[in-house]
Image: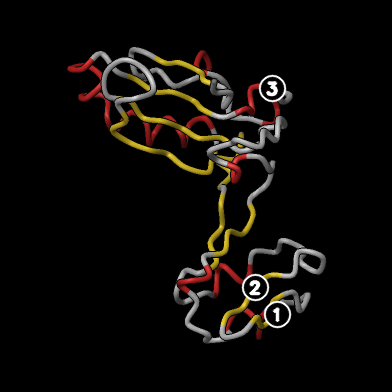
Amino acid sequence: MGIVFNIQKCSIHDGPGIRTLVFLKGCPLKCTWCSNPESQGTTPEIASFHKRCIGCRACQKNCPERAIVQDGPLFRIDASLCSNCLKCAELCYADSKQVVGKEMTTTEVMAEVVKDRTFYKHSGGGVTFSMGSILLPASSSVSGPGRSTRSRPSMMSWRPSIRR
């Protein structure tokens, strides 16, 4: 099992052909130039989109830690109080608070990936597992490409988040 924060379909820039990118959480590198800083944590976490906040106070009223504080007309999370229970995201009507990361098994990930096998077949594409979780112990990430289901795409690759 592992924490997946995005499955992006129809990518053409991360390997040959049409590809599905599976972005995993858990990169220990913490590079300042990281294009996906939401990938760095190893657990699901809250992302705040302040411009979407409608001021309904649902998050503030239901936060068991009282970590939602008013900042002008908007509401933000005080990280020093937050226990990462994710309730604020579950209750946010406007999606200004969203959970980044979902625990998925290899079978669940591959069930999503094989939906596009026709595109892989005709374009020479496949799936790319991306982010730095390859640097973590095996139990912390989705099992690698060799551990996929029988209906696996014809071409798989593993790309850490290191870019030059």
Quarter containing the C terminus: top right
Q: Nearer the viewer, residue 128 or 106?
A: 128
Q: Position of residue 47 (x, y in %)?
A: 58, 59
Residue type at mark 3? Leu
**Disc 3: which residue:** 135
Task: Assign a secondary structure to mark 3.
Answer: helix
Cα separation between marks 3 and 2: 32 Å
Whether residue 151 is visible here, answered yes or no, is no
Q: Quadrant of residue 1?
A: top right
In the rendered view, tell whether residue 78 sits above or below residue 143.
below
Q: Which mark is residue 69?
A: 1
**Disc 2: which residue:** 76
Task: Assign a secondary structure to mark 2.
Answer: strand
Q: Which residue occupies 50% across, 35% down?
A: 23
Q: Give neighbour class at mark 2: few <14, some 14-19, many 20+ (Cα, 10 Å).
A: some
Residue type at mark 1? Val
Q: How is the image coloured?
A: secondary structure
Q: Nearer the viewer, residue 149 or 26?
A: 26
Q: Which residue occupies 27% across, 30% down?
A: 116
Q: Position of residue 79 (x, y in %)?
A: 76, 64
Observer-side mark, 1 or 3, equals 1
Q: Position of residue 103 (x, y in %)?
A: 59, 44
Residue type at mark 2? Arg
Mark 3 or mark 2: whose residue is earlier in sequence: 2
Q: Give neighbour class at mark 1: few <14, some 14-19, many 20+ (Cα, 10 Å).
A: some
Q: Quadrant of residue 46?
A: bottom right
